[in-house]
Image (tube, rainbow, N blue to C red):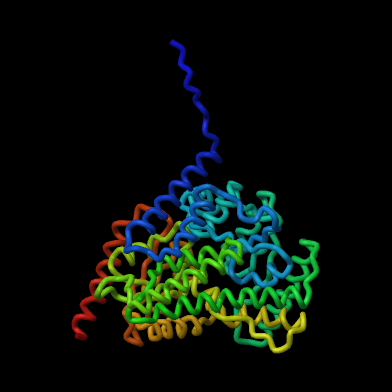
C-alpha cells in the first residue's frame, strides 16, 4: 500500500518560529486565563501580541522601520521624519539560547536574546536601520556583532553623567547629530511643523498613560501590573494612533472600575513597586509570579514601562533647534538608568513611588549578567532599609528552570508583607 503522507523537513528558521510562538502563547494564555476577569479593553492588547509574536503579522509594511536598542533614542524625531520606532529589546528564551552562541555565556540575557533575534532575522517588521545609544556596555558591543548580520547600525553617543552642563551639552550635540543622520537616511527633512506635531502626539500618549497610572494609587486598584506591562510594551512596536485609541478606551473602562471600587487584587494583597532589569514580553516571569502569589504591582521603575513615560518634552520656544534640544533634555534629565556613575535620582524615584502608590514593599529584579543592576542593588537595598521599606532582591535569567525556587522566595516575601499588614490592624 502506497504511503501518500508527505513529510516536510522543518528548517531551523521555521523551528525557531514555532518555538517562539509556543513561548508567546504560553505566557499570553497565563495572562488572560489565570487571573480575575481582566478589563474588556485589554483584548486589543492581547490580540496585538498574538498577531505580532505568535503569527508574526507585520504592522508597518508602509513605513521605514527604525530599530532602537534603548529608550534613549528619541521617538519624537523618528515619528517627525515619518519613520516608525521599533524597540529591539527582546524577551524570548528561544532567542537567548541562540545569542548564547554569539556572545559570552555570562552576558545579560536581554542582550543575548536581542542579538539572537537579529541573527535569526525572524521579524514581523524587520528594521531598516538601527540606532544604538552607548549606554549599557553590552548593548554597545552588541551593536558591532549585529552589523555582521547585514544591518546598518549607527551609534548615538551617550554620557555617563548627567549632572554637569558639559554632559548635557554633549548629549544635545548627539541628538542633533542623530536628527541629521536619520533625516539623511530617510530622505526626509525635519521641520518645525512635523516635529511640533510629533512632540504633541507623544505628549498626549504620555498624558493618557499617567491618567491610567494614577488610578493605581487608589485603595482599590482597578488594573493588575501584568496588564500595565502589556500596555507599555505595546508602545514599543504598535502604530501610535492605534495605541492611543486603545488606551483611551482602556482608560474609560478603568475609570469606571475605579468609581465602582473594583479591586483587581485580593482583600489583603500587598502593594508592590517593581524595579530593576526591564521585563520584556514574553519574559514576564517575575511579574507573573508576584501577582500569582496574591500581590499586586501598583507601580514600577523600569525602562520597559514607567520610566519611558515619565517626563514630557518641555518647550519654551517652538523653534526647530530649541525643540531638538528640549527633546535631548527630556531624555537625559529624566533618565534614572543605573549606567550613570551616580544615581541618587533612581533611589529617590523608587522611594517616591513607594510613598505615592502606598506600596508595602519593593521587588528588585536583576538579570544575571546585567552588571549595572547587579552592582547598584547594594545602594538601593541600603536606602530602602534606611527608609524602613521592605525589599526583596532577585537575580534571574530567561530560563524557565528557576520557576519553583523563585516562586518560593516571592511567596515568602509576600507573606511577610501580609503579616506586617495584619500587625498594623
Q: Nearer the viewer, residue 161 or 151?
A: 151
Q: Nearer the viewer, residue 285 or 86?
A: 86
Relative to 215, is 247 above or below? above
Residue at point 73%, 77% (across, down): 173
Residue at point 45%, 71% (across, down): 276
Relative to 226, is 100 above or below? above
Specify the quadrant of the image occupied by residue 298.
bottom left
Q: Furthest residue to the top?
A: 1
Residue at point 74%, 67% (across, down): 81
Provide residue 357's location: percent of width, then percent of height. 39, 82
Provide residue 113's location: percent of width, then percent of height. 52, 54
Q: Horizontal placement of 201 versus 250: left or right?
A: right
> On the rendered image, what quadrant is the N terminus found in?
top left
Q: Horizontal placement of 119 versus 95: left or right?
A: right
Q: Nearer the viewer, residue 315 or 248?
A: 248
Provide residue 2's location: percent of width, then percent of height. 46, 12
> On the rendered image, what quadrant is the C terminus found in?
bottom left
Q: Nearer the viewer, residue 16 or 133?
A: 16
Provide residue 385's location: percent of width, then percent of height. 34, 83
The mark total stands at 0
Residue at point 68%, 82% (across, down): 326
Amino acid at each position: 500500500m502506497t504511503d501518500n503522507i508527505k513529510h516536510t523537513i522543518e528548517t531551523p528558521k521555521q523551528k525557531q518560529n514555532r518555538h517562539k510562538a509556543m513561548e508567546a502563547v504560553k505566557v499570553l494564555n497565563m495572562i488572560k486565563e489565570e487571573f480575575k476577569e481582566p478589563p474588556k479593553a485589554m483584548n486589543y492588547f492581547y490580540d496585538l501580541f498574538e498577531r505580532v509574536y505568535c503569527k508574526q503579522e507585520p504592522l508597518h509594511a508602509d513605513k521605514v522601520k527604525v530599530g532602537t536598542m534603548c529608550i534613549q533614542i528619541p521617538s519624537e524625531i523618528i515619528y517627525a521624519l515619518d519613520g516608525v520606532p521599533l524597540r529591539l529589546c527582546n524577551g524570548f528564551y528561544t532567542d537567548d539560547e541562540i545569542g548564547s552562541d554569539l556572545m559570552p555565556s555570562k552576558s545579560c540575557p536581554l542582550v543575548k536574546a536581542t542579538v539572537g533575534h537579529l541573527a535569526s532575522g525572524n521579524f514581523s517588521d524587520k528594521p531598516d536601520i538601527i540606532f544604538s545609544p552607548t549606554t549599557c556596555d553590552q548593548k554597545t558591543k552588541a551593536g558591532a556583532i549585529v552589523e555582521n548580520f547585514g544591518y546598518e547600525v549607527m551609534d548615538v553617543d551617550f554620557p555617563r553623567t548627567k549632572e554637569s552642563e558639559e554632559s548635557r551639552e554633549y548629549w544635545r550635540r548627539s541628538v542633533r547629530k542623530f536628527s541629521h543622520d536619520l533625516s539623511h537616511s530617510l530622505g526626509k527633512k525635519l521641520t518645525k511643523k512635523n516635529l511640533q506635531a510629533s512632540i504633541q502626539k507623544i505628549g498626549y500618549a504620555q498624558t493618557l498613560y499617567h491618567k491610567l497610572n494614577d488610578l493605581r494609587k487608589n485603595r482599590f486598584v482597578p488594573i493588575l501590573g501584568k496588564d500595565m506591562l502589556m500596555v507599555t510594551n505595546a508602545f514599543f512596536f504598535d502604530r501610535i494612533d492605534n495605541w492611543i485609541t486603545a488606551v483611551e478606551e482602556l482608560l474609560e473602562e478603568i475609570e469606571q472600575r475605579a468609581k465602582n471600587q473594583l479591586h483587581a487584587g485580593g482583600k489583603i494583597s500587598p502593594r508592590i513597586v517593581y524595579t530593576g532589569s526591564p521585563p520584556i514580553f514574553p519574559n514576564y516571569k517575575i511579574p507573573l509570579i508576584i501577582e500569582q502569589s496574591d500581590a499586586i504591582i501598583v507601580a514600577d521603575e523600569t525602562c520597559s514601562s514607567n520610566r519611558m513615560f515619565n517626563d514630557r518634552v518641555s518647550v519654551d520656544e517652538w523653534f526647530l533647534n530649541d525643540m531638538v534640544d528640549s527633546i535631548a533634555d527630556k531624555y537625559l534629565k529624566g533618565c534614572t538608568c543605573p549606567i550613570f556613575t551616580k544615581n541618587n535620582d533612581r533611589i529617590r524615584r523608587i522611594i517616591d513611588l513607594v510613598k505615592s502608590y502606598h506600596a508595602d514593599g519593593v521587588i528588585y529584579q536583576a538579570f544575571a549578567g546585567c552588571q549595572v543592576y547587579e552592582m547598584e542593588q547594594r545602594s538601593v537595598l541600603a536606602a530602602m532599609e534606611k527608609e524602613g521599606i521592605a525589599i526583596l532582591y532577585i537575580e534571574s535569567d530567561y530560563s524557565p528552570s528557576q520557576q519553583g525556587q523563585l516562586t518560593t522566595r516571592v511567596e515568602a516575601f509576600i507573606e511577610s508583607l501580609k503579616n506586617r499588614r495584619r500587625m498594623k490592624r
